[in-house]
Image: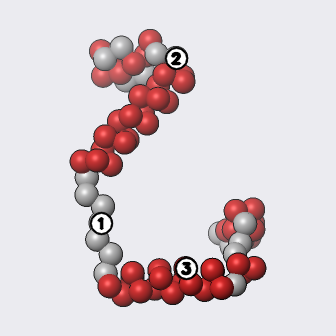
Amino acid sequence: MTKLMKELGIDRLSPPERIALAMEIWESLERQIPSPEITPEQRLQLQQRDRELTNNPEIALTWDEIRAHVEDHP
């Protein structure tokens, strides 16, 4: 544990309590930091991909397939 974590008493929290605290901190940052803007071109590409997947759901990959591909192509 770092000095700050000990000073704040975080070292006395259980693992589930520390996870909950980390999630609360993360969520508070999400509310304070604006999401990056996407360009009109990026939005169009996302819409096209969404339509393609909606019209052809069989082209979707499972997480296992994606993971296997990434592991095979480091």
Q: Say how many tags the image has.
A: 3
Do the numbered discs 3 and 1 sit on residues whose CB atoms are within 8 Å? Answer: no
Vertical arrangement, residue 70 with respect to residue 30, above or below: below
Q: Amino acid at mark 2?
A: Ser
Vertical arrangement, residue 24 with respect to residue 68, above or below: above
Q: Which residue is mark 1?
A: 36
Q: Residue at (55%, 79%) from the top-left corner?
A: 50
Which numbered disc covers residue 14?
A: 2
The answer for how far apart the CA atoms under marks 2 and 3 are is 42 Å
Q: Residue at (35%, 36%) from the top-left corner?
A: 25
Do the numbered discs 2 and 3 sit on residues whose CB atoms are within 8 Å? Answer: no
Label 2: which secondary element: loop
Q: Is residue 36 left or right of residue 59?
A: left
Q: Choose between 67 and 53: the one closer to the eye.
A: 53
What is the quadrant of the C terminus in the image?
bottom right
Query: Percent x, y for residue 38?
Result: 32, 75
Q: Amino acid at mark 3?
A: Asp
Which circle's residue, 2 or 3, is located before the other in the chain? 2
Query: Percent x, y for residue 28?
Result: 31, 40
Q: Which residue is mark 3?
A: 50
Q: Is residue 43 left or right of residue 29?
A: right
What is the quadrant of the N terminus in the image?
top left
Q: Choose between 21 and 50: the one closer to the eye.
A: 50
Q: Is residue 71 visible?
A: no
Q: Neighbour class for label 2 at 10 Å: few (<14), some, many (≥20)?
A: few
Query: Percent x, y for residue 55?
Result: 65, 85
The label nearer to you, 2 versus 3, is: 3
Q: Amino acid at mark 1?
A: Pro
